[in-house]
Amino acid sequence: MLYLRVAEQELVQLYLDKKLFSMVHFYVGQEAVAVGVCDALKPEDKVMGNHRSHGHYLAKGGNFRRMVCELLGRANGLARGKGGSMHMIDKSVNFIGSTPLLGSVVPLATGVAFEQKYNKRDTITTAFFGDGASEEGVVYESYNLAALYQVPLLLIVENNLFAINSKLKDRRAPGHSLEKIVSGFGIEYRKADGNDYKDVTTKAKELADFVRREKRPAMLECITYRHMAHSTPLMDEKYREVDTLEERTKQDSIAKLKVELLAGGTKESELALMEAELKKSVLADIQFALESPFPPKEDIYTDMYAE
């Protein structure tokens, strides 16, 4: 979780220094969800993400050096510099891809899970998407198909209270219940405190085991806080009501884990050393990316469906 936080904080600085031109959606504040869920999965399980997926990729065991190369449009990036932040893919760690089209990860992941069932693989697919994306029509259709065909799909809703800046109360009718909706389709449902790593990983493990055993879909809704603005690192507190700066600071998952570690006997100096080593590694990867070549011009029309 600290690795994700340090990496993104350095990417934020890269953005502010006008060296990073890819559209970016930072994951700061939601680390307990990605790490908690991925810690509950097996290496051979597949993961799909969305527009805010730096954390999902790194938590699945991804390579930060290749990721930052992709963000900087370099030839040795995850998609050879052609995709940027929202089109990452790394089959070597079973991160099957991320998509910026809101809600589209759900039907895509349903298809991946269907392939697992069809070929009798003992693996599952996990899809990360947000509370706003969960309201898209294609998501409801996918719930139905996933339940109808009984595919091994674990749905992770990261409810950070906003669809860009739109509050839940402005988008959902009184009485709206995600639990009732997905349960009505026959999908197993749990809710977790997305600011609490232990709660997330315990419930994610229960549901991953359920999906693997029962061969049918399940959902974990994680209530969490997005510390930054929707698509930039700039802070804007005007629209915050529940997740105020004071509340985010108090509920920060990494800060809470640090308190637990110190209470358990870990020394402050050990944690400081860990953070310093992580930052050194992250900065080295960023420097490598900055010095890496761009794709050659002749590759501009490769990897296309049609010329």
Image: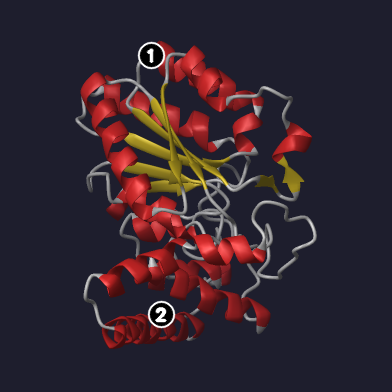
| Of the pair 187 and 244, the residue shown nearer to us | 244
Q: Quadrant of the N terminus?
A: bottom left
Q: Is residue 201 above or below residue 149?
A: below
Callout 1 secondary element: loop
Q: State which tag comes first along the sequence, 2 or 1.
A: 1
- Residue 90 visible (yes or no): no
Q: Is residue 117 above or below residue 21?
A: above
Residue 60 lies left or right of residue 234; in this view the side is: left
Q: Residue 115: name its quadrant.
A: top left
| Of the pair 111 and 76, the residue shown nearer to us | 111
The residue labelled by disc 1 is 149
Q: Residue 63: name its quadrant.
A: bottom left
Look at the image and name its color scheme: secondary structure
Callout 2 secondary element: helix
The amino acid type, in three-letter code, at marker 2 is Val
The amino acid type, in three-letter code, at marker 1 is Tyr
Query: Which residue shows up at 51% across the image and 32% down it?
Result: 106
The answer to whether the residue labelled 2 contacts the one labelled 1, judged by CB atoms less than 8 Å apart, is: no
Q: Furthest residue to the front?
A: 263
Question: Residue 123's spot in the image, x, y percent?
Answer: 24, 34
Question: Residue 256's spot in the image, x, y percent?
Answer: 41, 65
Give neighbour class at mark 1: few <14, some 14-19, many 20+ (Cα, 10 Å).
some
| Of the pair 110 and 156, the residue shown nearer to us | 156
- Residue 160 visible (yes or no): yes
Question: Residue 230's spot in the image, x, y percent?
Answer: 68, 57
The residue labelled by disc 2 is 282
Cα–Cα gap, marks 2 and 1: 43 Å
Question: Residue 297's spot in the image, x, y percent?
Answer: 58, 70
